[in-house]
Image (cartoon, rainbow, N blue to C red):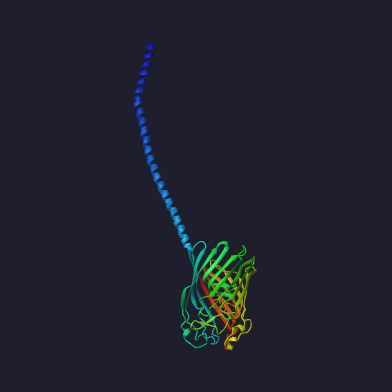
Amino acid sequence: MNKKKITAAAMLGIAMSLSGTAMAAPEAGQDLEARIAAIEQQQQQLTKQLNALKKENAKLRKKATGVESNKEAISDLKKEQERFKISGFVRTQWESRNDTNGGLRNWENEKTNNRYYLNLDGTMKINENWMGHFQVETNNRYAGSTATGDNFGHSTNKNKIDDKDWGTIQRVWLTGNLPNGVEVNVGRRWTYLGQQFSLLGATVNGIDATIPVNKNGLRAGAFYYNMAEYTNADFSFWGAMLKGPVAKNLDIALAYAHIGGGDKEVPYVRREDGGPDYSHGNWTGKNAFVISASTNVARNLRLTADYARTDFSVSDLNATRPEWNQISGNSNQSFMARLDYKWTNPDVVGSFAAFAGYHYIGRNGFIMSDENDGAIKQNSRGWSLGFRYVPWKRIVWETKYVISENDMHQWNSWDKSYTRKLLRTQLDFYF
């Protein structure tokens, strides 16, 4: 009995087991299909995400290409901007001076530098070797002229109507930086011979070229110039120059010039009709030179000195009237010395500088020396004292006082020397 029960139970268990297996098979198949469907759905979602990422990546690449293109465009624009640069300053100026010498020099306008002044410099890059330049000077005078006569001492109202406004592109020139360190300037520009512009400090037409002598900046060269912008100066001159540092604490500027215009006569003065006037003879001689040097004599203290000389002599003057021979002393020599304490920087508020100087400019001791806007006159000797200060960024205040003996070598028998006093103050606004 027990054996039969066990057998029956076993058979029932096997039957139930087979029955359960047969009944579970459809559920397993359904689960597999569901899993496959889920995986396919995930695959579709991943495909969509992948396509979206591909599109986003394409957009980013396009954007990156645009950014690079913009960078190139900005770089090209900067290059174009760098090809043309403007700089300079605006000046407001006031001064007091006594130039009429008690009426003997009644053609002088003592208020010519009471003005607003613009100096505009333009630079244009042509290629890697050449640059174009221009310079504009504009004067707006706010004070009427004090002149009552012409430069022959005759009474006239001609100069009472003084041009209060003038300004054009006065100077245009090219600079070239050529192979082997050759530098060339050609055109009309303001240039100088002597560190204090003692032999020449004027606008000229012409060409000069220099080459490097050493690695410290010393250069040697030659020039050919003729006078420009001056109705009473009509001659050319040419020669050689050497300028730059020769030692750690010594800069030099040497130059020799041969002055053209005829055998002994230079058409230095022009008649009212524009023709050359030789009656006054040769005022400058035929040869001239300048020796100039500067060095730091102490910390923040720099000394600069110029010596210029021409081969002018009274016998060469060949004047038609004896009154034009009233020349005495070393009229064919010029000497200038200046001591500078510190230097100003327009970008450094509070920077300060002071200077003192002595000048002796013989009537015939230069080609065309610079007069520092009338502060240091030709044919005079005297002292100057002044300072420069930066009260605000890119604004420089300068004040100077000059006392000198003017007309120390008389032009004629009725001329007299006189003591000239000048006080000038000005503000320069740099841009």
* Furthest residue in direction front, as rendered: 263
From the top left corner, tell me how far across and down residue 69 is, in percent. 43, 54
Residue 207 shown left or right of residue 251 in the figure: left
Image quadrant where one finds the N terminus: top left
Choose between 252 and 266: the one closer to the eye. 266
From the top left corner, tell me how far across and down residue 429 is, in percent. 50, 70
In which quadrant of the rendered view does residue 20 lie?
top left
* Rendered view: 409 above or below 357: below
Choose between 379 and 249: the one closer to the eye. 379
* Furthest residue in direction top, as rendered: 1
* Rendered view: 155 above or below 221: below
Q: Inspect this view and state whether residue 431 appears.
A: no
Residue 169 shown left or right of residue 18 in the figure: right
* Rendered view: 247 above or below 30: below
Q: Inspect this view and state whether residue 36 appears.
A: yes
In which quadrant of the rendered view does residue 370 lie?
bottom right
From the top left corner, tell me how far across and down residue 424 is, in percent. 54, 77
* Rendered view: 58 above or below 285: above
Choose between 262 and 348: the one closer to the eye. 262
In which quadrant of the rendered view does residue 240 lie?
bottom right
* Residue occupying the point 39% across, 11% down: 3
